[in-house]
Amino acid sequence: MSLSNYRDQIIVALDVQKDEDFIRLTESLKGHATYVKIGMELFYTKGPDAIKVLKEMGFKVFLDLKLHDIPNTVLKSVKTLVKLGVDIINVHAGGGLEMMKAAKVGRDQGMEEYGITQKPLLIAVTQLTSTNQNILEQDLLIKQEISEVVKSYAMKAKEAGLDGVVSSALDVELIKEACGKEFITVTPGIRPKGSSTDDQKRVMTPTEAINIGSDYLVIGRAITNSDNPGGALEKIIEEI
Ligand code: C5P
């Protein structure tokens, strides 16, 4: 695969709040990153303005708000997010089948109502990459193997008609086996060799994640903590 294709598979997580950090990061990433991710931190600080600015700069935007609420609220919220023109939207699979189905209805209604022609991908978070077996059992009282839980949540997302899931790269093979190759996997918890794992527990290197079949890699601190984020991204692409 060519370097430009790998570039289109990397989503840089812009987990910042201050304007100066936002400007420093986006200026450095301009012309290097195809996708950027707006998480709760940035969205709750800058709101829909952040999306507008990033779209004007030419980035594709993954709005990572991980919706998890009653189906009616999720339906209406997704519809509103579609109006903002984002490229990827997500919900928590833990919200259940009905909630995920409602999210899809919201996406489809939003496209129709607001005349959006480019369909935003709608994906579900299986388990956070900061969750391990111990947390699952002790805190969430889920006794199954984490990989079984991830697989089952992914199958529910597929049944609801979603486009794919967010998961650890460690679960990509299992998910593709259960849901098919076309079912998209977006994988955070990516750490180039030698970098700190921070709070992530289930991590993989960019090369390993691509080789195992991950469709999109979400990379945050390994790029954003660098003095030269654009350069750090290029280094990762070359390494792959
Ligand atoms: O800095 P780091 O590379 O760990 O950033 C990972 C990003 O992916 C964060 O924005 C985090 O919120 C997000 N994420 C995650 N695990 C999930 C879903 C999203 O780490 N399951």
Image (cartoon, helix red, strand yellow):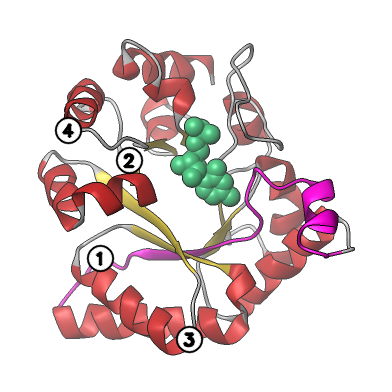
Q: Position of residue 209 (x, y in %)?
A: 63, 34
Alpha-carbon neighbours of circle 3 within 10 Å: few (<14), some, or many (≥20)?
some
Considering the numbered disc 4 on the image, is that residue within a helix, a strand or a loop? Answer: helix
The residue where tag 2 is placed is 36
Alpha-carbon neighbours of circle 1 within 10 Å: few (<14), some, or many (≥20)?
few
**Structural distance between the alpha carbons of marks 2 and 1:** 17 Å
| Residue drawn at x 67%, y 63% as measured from the top left | 180
Asked whether residue 215 appears in the rendered view, the answer is no
The residue where tag 1 is placed is 118
Image quadrant where residue 168 sits: top right
Q: Position of residue 125 (x, y in %)?
A: 57, 59
Image quadrant where residue 18 sits: top left
User: What type is the residue that disc 3 sits on?
Assistant: Pro
**Structural distance between the alpha carbons of marks 2 and 4:** 16 Å
Extent of the magenta region: 115-142
Tell me which label, 3 or 4, sits earlier in the chain: 4
**Structural distance between the alpha carbons of marks 3 and 2:** 27 Å
The residue where tag 3 is placed is 71
Tell me which label, 3 or 2, sits earlier in the chain: 2
Q: Position of residue 233 (x, y in %)?
A: 39, 21
Q: Are marks 1 and 3 in contact (CB under 8 Å)?
A: no
